[in-house]
Image (spheres, coloured by chain):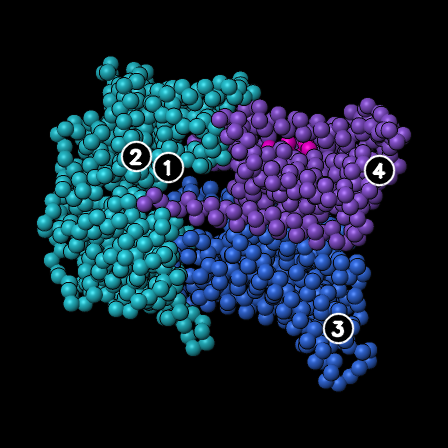
Chain colours: A purple, B cyan, C blue
Amino acid sequence: MKVSTGTVRFLKSSEFYLFLVIAGLGAILTVVTEDFFSLENLFDVLVSYSFLGIMAVGLMVVLISGGIDISFTATATVAQYIMASFIIQHGGGWWVAFLIPVTIGIMLGAVNAALVYNLRVHSIIITIATLNVFYGVLIFVTRGKWIYNFPDWFAEGYSLFDFSAADGTDYSFSLSIIVLLAVFAVTGFLLNRTSIGRQIYAMGGNMDAAKRMGFNLLKLHFFVYCYMGFLAGIAGLVQAQLVQTVAPNSIVGRELEVVAAVVLGGASLAGGAGTLLGTILGVTLIAIMQNGLTLLGVSSYWHKIVIGMIILISVSITAYNRKLEERRHAEIDV
Amino acid sequence: MNGDNFLELRNISKRFHGVQALKDVDFELRRGEIQCIVGENGSGKSTLIKIISGVYTPEPGGTITIDGVSQSDITPAKSTHLGIQVIYQDHSLFPNLTVAENIGIHQHLETGRQFVNWKKLRQTARDAMSKIDVSLDVERLVEKLSVADRQLVAICRAIAADARLVIMDEPTSSLTRQEVDALFKVVRDLQQKSITIVFVSHRLNEVMEIAERVTILRDGLKVATFDAKDMDDHKLGFLMTGQEISYSALTNGFNREKTILEVDRLSKKGNYRDISFDLHEGEVLGFTGLLGSGRTELALSLFGMNPPESGQIRINGETVHLATNHEAIARGIGYVPEDRLTLGLIMEQPVGGNIALTVLKTLLTRCNLIDSGKQKAFIDQRISDLNIRVPDAEVAVNTLSGGNQQRVVLAKWIATHPKILILDAPTVGVDVAAKSGIYEIVKRLASHGIGIILISDEVPELLSNCHRILLMRKGRLVGQYLPSEISEKELGQKINEG
Amino acid sequence: MLKLTSDIQRIRSLLGLKDEANVYLIVILAALIGLFTLVLPDQFFRAANLQSMAFQVPELGILSIAMMVTLLSGGINLAIIATANMAGILMAYILTQFIPEGATGAGPILMMTIAILAGLAMSTLIGFLNGWIIAYLGVSPILATLGTMTLIQGANVVLTKGYVISGFPDPIRFIGNGLVLGIPMPLYVFAFSAFLVSILLRRTPFGVAVYMLGSNEKATLFSGVSIRNIILKIYSLSGLLCGVAALIMISRFNSAKAGYASSYLLVTILAAVLGGVDPFGGFGKIIGLVLSLLILQVISSGLNLLGMSAHLTIALWGGILIFILFLNQLRQRLGHVKV
């Protein structure tokens, strides 16, 4: 009985639907294209979407807490820019390359947290403002120059478990993949196994009740927005290492794409809902969709149209189902 | 301090922005007793609760003694630590979490605890539930539970937090009679476990049923504490308001010759079945029944917001199909919903805007713009007609008292010149004194020939305001009574039967 | 005497001075103007600068109104920029494909009218579609318009293949660049739109319903207002305004493209909230929005004259919003103590 209720719950969950869609899409792409279901391609997808995945996970945590952060792309950009400038001028190793963006991310996150908590204005407004401030100041100070010429050790990257596939190509768990998996693991543990993670869910579910129960809301706000900043800093590092340049406009502007991925994964803008698995699947769907379209030779111009369609269809189905459910609930026993 | 007392308050005063919310109140709770606090809105009930739970600090001079120890500055955390738990009207649960996690939520707040022990959490939940003989699926999300079950979860949470005093704020307001009985059983179980219970309620008959002692507050002062067995609802009502409340009985008749509304075998699956009745010009027709008897669903059908599946509605002899409330309003039907806060009024917006909202189309100039002069005159007229006390029409509705808010809703519907006005629980949350004002308005409207459907579960209100009373049970009409032929007690019993 | 006070009140309310928030905005605006006049004594108050400001305000201004009306109703329209670009591209396509170069007479004028009407119709239709998804499918506005935004952005790129469509007839360019009585054409269009929307919001049953809906959807429904109808209208209006903004945009640049004004999306929300619009609906006036737009433009022009980068402007815009929110919070806290 117990097993079956759990199974039923999973079968009814949005994650399951999303999984089915991804599986279906994967199957179609496997049949239609030669390259989709190859280790090389899947690795490519994983690597190139890892920084989006990292930011999505951070955003999910903010959404669960009942807030939203739009400024994370600016945070990531500021973090990677300062990191890149530093290691190019002063050298340093992986620790420096890691510590700088992470520290900056946490600091900018703390700014958001302090403003959201003290000004009592919805976080979407605050973070739109801070997005403009962070980004504007960065471009003003740096005049928008691109950064190349990373030190060799940074250009070469960092990898574990090099291995060769049957076809002789070499693969390795590169920096992006290692970091992405670590972020998944840490966030999953945080949300499901720690007291603070559960408090974040509770606060997102009912802020007033959390206040009455004596939750330390200030601490929770700081934790949530700093964690987002922390992950944005990491994402900045990963993205810089991936493309070997820091261009101020390469991440900013993709906020809503990440929001879309997280919401597709079942997180609610009203707070309190969202799972790690859902977010992973949401990012996966968008990644596979774009990859598939590329492999099919569809011009990249069409990608946005398809993503827009997916968002519209999925949110419409969810909303419509909820409407039907409400109608059923309204009935009484006669 | 008396050794039998769990809690003693002495000389408690509190003022807010110059308003004296509590003045020199003494209050005591015996260990393991069930005590009720009653009083009108603004009598200081919730301030008293908040002082006990540490949300507010009393003014200097007041003392709080809990368990024989004098507590100077009590905070919410401290009161929780001392075993004081408040169950608010909204239950303060986390809808997105499971039953187990809601009950064991305090575990997440324990100092020094970093990680969740899910097994222990579930065990805590089961233990708490078994103490009061409740079994709910611990893995269910609270948002999927009924209101009554949510309340049980809130009680279990208090138990799991080692409560020694549980304060329940209006715990019965949205429960059916059966659910109230179940709740009372739980409350007595808690008492068996020597937990002290404070019950805050405005339903006086329920107060009599469960409480051992009753404390009455009026205008921030304590009137007295009595043994419940020495009390009845009339005495309580008098002590709460300081005036003998006797509602003038309905004297004006109505026009039996003119039927304005005929409802013929109206049915809707899952809502109500086979409903037939007539409403005459100037008649006040009472509808009563327990929560979930289908009375509100029926009212919504008459208002076009819940189209019936079969049967007929005739207005002035003409069959109508009401698919939206727009059509119903055009046919002269008005509906004052029970839930004034979320359905009846737009609380943040001005009084004037609320009153004029339903009739804006009649206040236009020749170029179809709102004629602000006409609008202002119209609104002022309504405000003075119903004697609504406001500084000006531009203030937001949520700054008014409950009684004045209810007058604004009435004004809004009277503005549409309805022929049929449906009032769903019009005096819920309104002070006893303000109630009679609303009854006067109802009578005046009826005397102008408006047919009124008054939905209520307050028996005295029905008996003194209606020409006829119809009783609904499980979606069906099961009885018709004339106020002159049935006593308060009999009608009360009929409502709660079955 | 009584008459006088009521007259003063009337004037105050006409100027939007009844709301304390507007007083803040006026003070900040005056302070900024004073500051820039001091720092740039010869440049800031020159006709050329004022005129260039007057050319720049309308585009962001009309888009901000398009955002504001949906915010008032408790929604949001993230698709405004995409909608404007779609309308602009359609207008540009008709203008460049169906009007032979150097043609004169009634034919081209007719075709230009058709182009403009087609663009406005297209943007209104997109708005209507947004409204339909929100009202009938029950999708939350932020998600619905996020979807249509992405979809339409994609469509814009596909339609133009990323290229710029340029080269419009003189009358069209006049709409974006012409002067009448020394005042730029776009400013007339903006003033006219702001005035009309303001009348619509304050003086019609529709407008009142929008505010009510923004505060409490269910209670508005129970008052006999057709919520769906209002939502359809408000998003159609928002779309229509995007079309008007598109006309100004393409005529000013003499071209249309998929990515114009893409940085304005968040700025329109910023402008509306700065102007006193409650981001959750129910409250906000055009006059506040106009003041906030003036503040943003004065900062932008002043910094530009000082040779500062446009990005510093954006940072300052964000900073000003936070500052205003801070003032509001401070006022509320002090107010509580006083009462």
- Magenta stretch encompasses residue A226: yes
First in sequence, mark 1 or 2: give its number: 1
Q: Residue furthest left?
A: B485
Give the left or right position of residue B86, taking residue A2 as reference: left
| Marks 3 and 4, how far apart at CA | 43 Å
How many labels, in total?
A: 4
Disc 3 crowd rating (10 Å Cα; few below 14, some 14-19, many 20+) is: many
- Helix, strand or loop under label 2: helix
Q: Are marks 1 and 2 in contact (CB under 8 Å)?
A: yes
Q: What residue type is labelled 2?
A: Glu
Q: What residue type is labelled 3?
A: Leu
Q: Are marks 1 and 4 in contact (CB under 8 Å)?
A: no
| Marks 3 and 2, how far apart at CA | 71 Å
Give the number of the disc on residue A244: 4
Look at the image and give the residue range highlighted in magenta: A224-231
Give the number of the disc on residue B179: 2
- Magenta stretch encompasses residue B113: no
Q: Name the residue that disc number 1 marks.
A: B147
Q: Which amino acid does label 1 sit on?
A: Val
Q: Mark 2 lies on which chain?
A: B
> Residue B218: x, y in percent?
22, 38
| Marks 1 and 4, how far apart at CA | 57 Å
Give the number of the disc on residue C95: 3
> Residue B197: x, y in percent?
28, 25
Disc 1 crowd rating (10 Å Cα; few below 14, some 14-19, many 20+) is: some
